[in-house]
Image: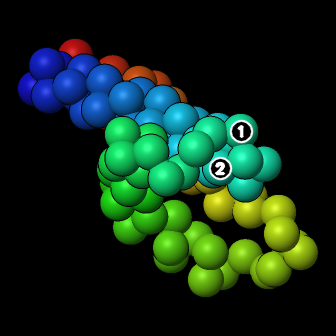
Amino acid sequence: MLALLETINLALTLYSYIIIASAIFSWLHAFNVINSSNHFVASIGEFLYRVTEPALRPIRRFIPDLGGIDISPIILLLIIFFLQRFLATTIAPALL
């Protein structure tokens, strides 16, 4: 059972990295640092959007519009951090 918790923790950590990469990619795209007409760059952007958007969309419905500033990735990262701490401090010790 502990192996399952460690696997969930690893998946949450990897998803955190993907969220951060998606936020950085969106900044680079918004400031025209990267060439979005490049097929490779466009496929990376599409992958990051498809992976993160299902988790970010419900958060965006509840937070108010801040005029171009999207804080939904930060909120999602806080939720992931809470889940990781909850697994490590509450669930894992109960299983040992």
Can I make out residue 88 in this image? yes
Location of residue 45 with respect to 3 vertically, above or below = below
Residue 93 versus residue 77: which sits nearer the camera?
77
Q: Where, quadrant-wise, is the C terminus in this rendering?
A: top left
Q: With 16 as the anchor, is 5 left or right in this view?
A: left
Q: Amino acid at mark 2?
A: His
Residue at point 43% right, 58% down?
49
Residue under label 2: 29
The location of residue 36, given as percent across then percent down, is 53, 51
Q: What secondary structure is found at the residue carrying circle 2?
A: helix
Asked whether residue 48 is in view, the answer is no
Name the quadrant of the N terminus: top left
Seen at 61% across and 83% down, the residue is 61
Disc 1 marks which residue?
Answer: 33
Viewer-proximal residue among 32 and 16: 32
- To which quarter of the image does residue 4 belong? top left
* Residues tagged 1 and 2 counted as in contact (Cβ below 8 A): yes
Residue 58's place in the image compared with 39, above or below, is: below
Q: Disc 1 residue type?
A: Val
Instruction: Sort mark 2 into few (<14), some (14-19) or many (20+) by Cα contacts within 10 Å.
Output: some
88 to the left or right of 62: left
Q: Is residue 49 left or right of residue 72?
A: left
